[in-house]
Amino acid sequence: MSTATAAAPDSTSAAPRALGSGDPQRREELTATGLRSAPRPSRLEAPISSLRGAGPKLAAAAAEIGLETVGDVVWHVPHGYRDRERVRPAGELRIGEQATVLVEVRSARVRPTRRRNLRILEASVVDASGALKAVWFNQAWLAERLRPGTHVLLSGKLERSGFRVEAHEIVRAPGAGPPDRSQGVGIHTTGLVPVHPATERLRPNRIREWAWQGVRLACDAIEPLPAGLRARRRLPGVADALRAAHFPLSRAAAARARERLAFEELFVHQTALALRRRGRREARRGIGIGKPGELVGRWLESLPFEPTADQRRAFAAIDADLATGRPMQRLLMGEVGSGKTVCALYAMLRALEAGHQAALMAPTETLAEQHAATLDRLLAGEPIPFALLTGATPAARRRDALARLASGELGLVVGTHALLEPDVELGSLVVAVVDEQHRFGVRQRAALDAKGPGGAAPHALHMTATPIPRTLSLTAYGDLDATTIRELPAGRKPVRTWAVGEEKRAGAYEFIRERLREGHQAYVVCPLVSDSEKLQAKAAAEEAERLAAGELAEFEVVLLHGQMPSRQKAEAMERFASGEAQVLVATTVIEVGIDVPNATVMLIEGAERYGLSQLHQLRGRVGRGEHESHCILFADPESELAQRRMKAIASIDDGFELAEVDLTLRGEGEVLGTRQHGLPRFRVAELPDDAELLAAARGELRVLIEDHGGLEAPELGLLVDTARRRFGDERTEGIAA
């Protein structure tokens, strides 16, 4: 560089200019600004015990709600705020008024009461405007700290008995002016006080103190959102948003900060799903299958019904997936009784006619057995042998099936987790159907994938009988291609549903007896007493015994629950399906897979304990024949929420509409069960409230991928790394909840 070029002219016009405004910047101003160091994310990984006040007991309590590091605390944003405004003069307060006062303690004493578990602390306090009596309940230990001359901030409500304190802070260095929040004074008692999600063992004020310490390290948080995206959507930086979310200056600032953090969370999750889809495509090759052949054509002709338009659309989607060299990853969602199993068998027969094998894996023996019975019925016009493999399969039959599967002689197999055993070898597994796929873990599905031929991954068709709102499908199953079947087969009648109280019990049993005398059959579903299958089995056994000796004594009653040996379950189902038994008393084990057209009545006990989708699944076991069917829900809906759910199930027939209602009423974690379904545990975003943000995040990700030609661009490295760190790595075992 020449000397003339290097020399900087003195004129203002040639001085450096600020980015954006274009204002001239002088050397003195630039050097006085100070330099901000690069983020050091490792500081956020420090254990929570590094925070003041986080001893072993409180650290253990924090770990129970996922707070193990300083970063966890920083991302543990408030779910609300208490507006404690400005500090008020004590002498101006009126009875019933909420306020914060800055006062000096004159005296403090613990007053005994007649109740052994109640101790009252009273303090005489004063400021320039007047005196107050401050009152605390069961905080006698505080008397030691409230010595005369101590200055305290008190937030609470003035009552006739005194100023009832809800929060307090001791001001160690009181001045003439208001509390200085920048020094941590007043975070419990003044301004917008954050209220963080807490527990019995970990109170909000403790989390608030930790958040005040941790938020100083917000500048060390990685910014995953590309600068162009933030500029386009006018989003604040992540550090500013975290600070404003915890300790905002206004409600508008808090709302803006929360929206930014929720958008980031949804955007990063959608990125993780895109990475997972890419990983599945690139990790292993699939085996392409050509157009449908003669076998599938004959089978379709042999069906005693005409496939619905939705089923034919599913056939076409499956055909398109099978034709590619990439493993199919499709989710088949269907309304109760919409014929998902027909679509699954279509995919399996496509593999069979191409000279390969197919497997159907179900989460329980009962469901696997029911699938086997359904396949047997659907294949009646085209007899094709298949094996049923569960933990209860006799040893001799299992050995024979394994040998025929390994040689390729047997093309179809239905089973439970037993299909994943190392000794189950399939010569050429090309299509795998996974029913109620959320009931299987990532490693279990990977074990089934590994049984593909020659290193190729089988095409996977995931089925769920739970109608899933679109908002949830984009988070729970956003890495899968989705096909929805809503159209019911011709002739299916809606099930008439009533939610009733105990006063209708006698009439309900008489109604059931009348249907049974007409030659129909009935289900009685026992209450969801707990998550324990053993307790539910006991409740069902007791109810079956009671009904057989009481209200339904003139009819044959059989029992079915998941704790019964397989042989007994099969016998109970056979007796009910054949009509030998008129009443089946069961747990929720019957909610999927059971098909007895002659069953026209269902009675569900304790209906308020179930979610809407599960109630809809259960009542889907009736209404499968030509006769009008009925579902009677005995419920004791004490809460308004339970009452609204009972009203919804009684008035809405469409499962997808019910799922939307359930989502609105209960939230995503309750509808699907966060842990069981692998839903991401969002720390800020809430569905369905943030459905618009989710749609925006998906749209922005598409734009980003189009602009950069993929997620491999170096400038997207921070985004990709954040997605893998928060939601798992597609290169190992998929997205972790």
Image (spheres, rainbow, N blue to C red):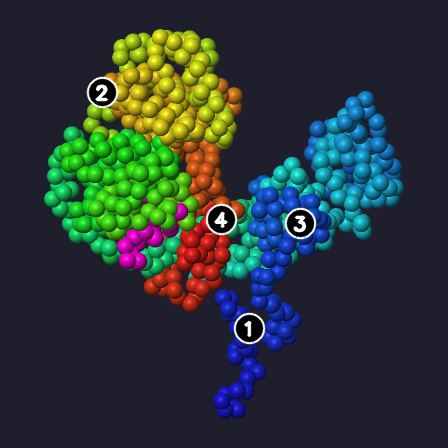
Residues packed near mark 3 inside 10 Å, few (<14), some (14 to 19) or many (20 plus): some
Which mark lies nearer to you, 4 or 2?
A: 2
Q: Are marks 3 and 1 in contact (CB under 8 Å)?
A: no
Q: Mark 1 points at which residue?
A: 24
**Do we see residue 85 in this rendering?**
no
Check residue 210 in the rendering and tell me which mark sits there, or answer none: 3
> Who comes first in sequence, dot 3 or dot 1?
1
Q: Mark 2 points at which residue?
A: 626
Bounds of the magenta segment: 444-468
Kind of element beneath mark 1 = loop
Kind of element beneath mark 3 = helix
Check residue 262 in the rendering and tell me which mark sits there, or answer none: 4
Which mark lies nearer to you, 4 or 1?
A: 4
Of the residues shown, which amino acid type is indicated by label 4? Ala
Residue 38 picture location, percent across and down: 57, 67
Furthest toward the front, the residue is 396
